[in-house]
Image (cartoon, rainbow, N blue to C red):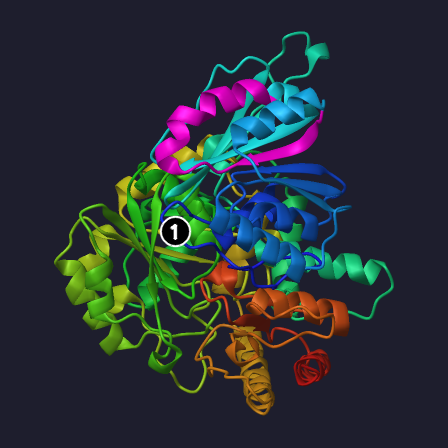
Amino acid sequence: MRIVAGRFGGRTLVAPKGDRTRPTADRVREALFSRLFDVNDLEVLDLFAGSGAIGLEALSRGARHAHFVEHAPRALAALRRNIAALGLTRAACTVLETSVANAVRRLELDDRRFDLIFADPPYREAEAVLPALLAAAEKLLKPGGRFIVEHAARTEPLGGIPGLALGAIRRYGDTALSEYAREEDESGGAEPMRIAQRLGAVAPSATLTLNQKAKDLRAQGKDVVALTAGEPDFATAPSIIEAINRSLERGDTRYVAVSGVEELRKAISKHYEATGLAYAPSEIVVSTGAKQALFNAMLCLIEPGDEAIVIAPYWLSYADMVRVAGGEVVTIATAEAAGFLATPAQLEAAITPNTRVLFLNSPSNPAGAVYGRAELEGLAEVLRRHPQVAIISDEIYDRFVYGGQDCPSILAVAPDLKPRTLVVNGCSKTYAMTGLRLGWAAGPKDIIEAMSTIQGQSTSNACAPIQFGAVEAITGDQSIVATMVRAFDERRAFVVEKLRAIKGVRCFDPKGAFYVFPNLEAYVGKKLPNGKTVANADTLAEYLVESQNLVVIPGEPFGAPNNVRLSFATDMATLEKGITRLKQGLEAL
């Protein structure tokens, strides 16, 4: 157990032993503080404190003061050891050595108020202690203050507490966090706007967040190197821009069919016909980027409680899309030594009667793994035994393959799986059209019609002039694609060689896409110049930004906490500068 972030980030905490102790998991605290609440300058009350992990995390992230309530001897000993190890004084924290009930009465008499109260009672005692605790919470909270209760995910939170509004319930595996807010007296009885519970486990896109961070640092005048963007650094071909302009000039600015203009769906159909796959235009839906196609597919395929399999390391949005749809994510962890490829045995072990979807991404983001015919045949044999599993074949990087590697679609290997396979692709990567947002899905007519229905109730059709630009992209001169592949292949070789020359860095040689995913596990446990201990790649990424003005994406959102993702879809000078800064930062440890 460790402090996740802030001035004490990475510091290890002592956890008390005993069957009454259940420290709040690191990932739950990360979600609580990083994604939900800014605790800077707040007064915090940590009930059932145990090791003090919650209150200490809050202090690490800038809370003004924390009160810890604990009376179990072992927990108190661990709590005091942790406070001493962090060098905290009474100005920063107060320990109340008493029961929670006594502490609440004392704090009420003293008229103490808090901005944030956290309660993590033993699950088997929660039903008995929470009603009285919540009833007293209104008197302990400042106006606008919040009360967070950790409880078993299988139990529902208490509602109808006078003076408290029940907000979001966020579930993380077996654990749930329920949020209560003190109702404002001047609200006139109006109910506060509530965020839907299904968003509780959904995080902002790490890639988009870090891309924006790089832009913000540049705006401050800093010399930032960002190896984060998942988009080619090439310009969109002039012929595509001209096709878009012609569309605008002839007035293609009105609504078109939700599933896409006929010209584009026919062009996509002919594209697949040339690769040996047959899709009628009616079996294709055009979306505002391949990401929307994937999202629509999850809303159509996943019911609450259904399971979807992702292969780690995986593109980070897969998991959150599944959760938004109410599904559960099942992860297959792959090994670098195996090329980051899932084996048939792993797939068989991951499938249950509740499995509804398998995400298959080849070439993969972030690792650049590519499935050959033999690997796909092995997976297909397993899938034939489980007809309830739909396959989402994300082929967005299918043109970016290196070293003569074969990169077939699973349907080229197992055409019998076509009735339950959805092929997703788009123009963003292949034709350097990321900002133009044009993607599609091809598959069984019933699922395509369902996806069109969902899309018709959200964004409707993709931008019509961009669709005509996509027709030109797919049917026109393909030389820009070959030019990009040659450049990316050269950059890939350069980056892999440079990374492998850094002591302690392991780097898989990607077979496709335009990312490298080096493993930095050798640096976990090392001390940073500021005294923090490296807990994982998150800590290292934060350190590299602060010390080197280098922005990389940590591997945790991709399911690989000791890796970082670097994009080589940028010029050689930027790559060389970025790798140099990475080397300097790591060698300083």
Q: Which amino acid does label 1 sit on?
A: Gly
Q: Residue at x 67, y 51 (%)?
A: 245
Compared with 156, 397 (above or below) is below
Q: Residue at x 34, y 67 (%)?
A: 274
Of residues 563 and 388, the one nearer the viewer is 563
Q: Where is residue 290 in the image (x, y as percent from the top left)?
A: 47, 53
Left or right relative to 567: residue 177: left
Q: Position of residue 401 (x, y in %)?
A: 44, 78
Does any portion of residue 276 appear in the rendered image?
yes
Q: Is residue 364 magenta?
A: no
**SS class, disc 1:** loop
In magenta, the rendered stretch is 112-137
Compared with 405, 48 (above or below) is above
Q: Position of residue 467 (x, y in %)?
A: 53, 49
Left or right relative to 438: residue 210: right
Q: Position of residue 192 (x, y in %)?
A: 61, 19
Q: Which residue is drawn at 38% across and 46% down?
A: 173
Does any portion of residue 519 appear in the rendered image?
no
Q: Which residue is drawn at 15% across and 51% down?
A: 387
Left or right relative to 414: residue 108: right
- Is disc 1 surrounded by few (<14), some (14 to 19) or many (20+) residues within 10 Å? few
Q: How many marks?
A: 1
To which quarter of the image does residue 580 belong?
A: bottom right
Of residues 395 and 166, the one nearer the viewer is 166
